[in-house]
Image (cartoon, helix red, strand yellow):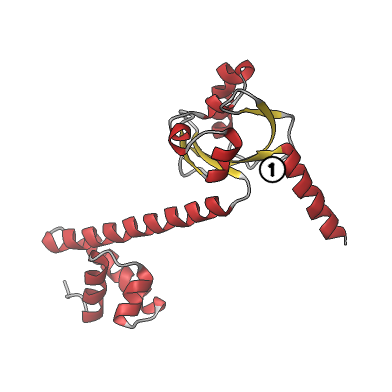
Amino acid sequence: MKKLSKIDQDVLRAMSEGLADHEVCRRLKISAQVFSRSLKRIEARAAAESDDAGMFYERALKRRQERINISLAARLHALMDASPQAVLVIDGRTGAIKEFNEVACQIFGYTKLELSELTVEDLVPDSIRAIHHAYRLGFLANVRKRTMGYHPPIMGVRKDGTEVDMAVALTATLADDDVMVVCSERTAWSGRELRQNQAEMA
């Protein structure tokens, strides 16, 4: 099989070092289009080769994917931290709280360590705690976007045991079982909604 071109070898070497795509382009002074074409050739070679060279290609591509995943996670965390609402990422199967922002800690009154050890059932009233898992699984079975605030009353429970009326939005994808919960105290959400409507009418 024909050897990789020099540019493909350089791209492969840079990816194996863990450089992001834009960093590869900058180092090699190539355009995104040139990088994309080179990547396709490397992927094709990785699929065709079965020797040590093929394993090297696979490792470089895996390193690139890991870098992409880290970048996507960082963007998600930045968006969560910038949100004025509480944002929690829940394992839809187990209810475990996997990720959350600072606002979630403030609303529910927990430290980051405490909240990371809870499930979403710990944040709902005793009256529905035993059946809440059925709501979770039902949502996963029929994934859909639920708009914030347009739902029957939903109560959240703070660390001190007090209950608060919440405006809640839910969203998920078919890629995994994670559910993103965006919530706010209903009084605060209603105030923002009213101001937004007034601004749109002005």
Position of residue 28 measured from the top left corner of the image (x, y, whole percent): 29, 80
Q: Quadrant of residue 113?
A: top left
Identify which residue, 153 or 107, lies in the foreground: 107
**Crowd tier of the residue under label 1, counting other residues whose Cα lies within 10 Å: few below 14, some 14–19, many 20 or above:** few
Residue at 52 percent of width and 45 percent of height = 101
Give the image quarter of residue 70: bottom left
Which residue ends up furthest to the bottom in the rendered image?
29
Image coords of residue 32 (percent x, y) = 40, 76
Camera sees residue 163: yes
**Left or right, 194 with reference to 44:** right
- What residue is shown at x 17% (from left), y 75% (from top)? 3
**Quadrant of image for the C terminus:** bottom right
Task: Work out whether residue 104 or residue 20 is closer to the camera in this orientation and state it.
Answer: 104
Secondary structure of residue under mark 1: loop
Q: Seen in the image, is 41 located left or right of residue 176? A: left
Q: Is residue 60 above or below residue 24?
A: above
As drawn, which residue projects farthest toward the left?
Answer: 52
Q: How many marks?
A: 1
Q: Quadrant of the N terminus?
A: bottom left
Looking at numbered disc 1 in the image, what kind of residue is underneath it? Thr
Q: Which residue is mark 1?
A: 147
Q: Is residue 13 above or below residue 193?
A: below
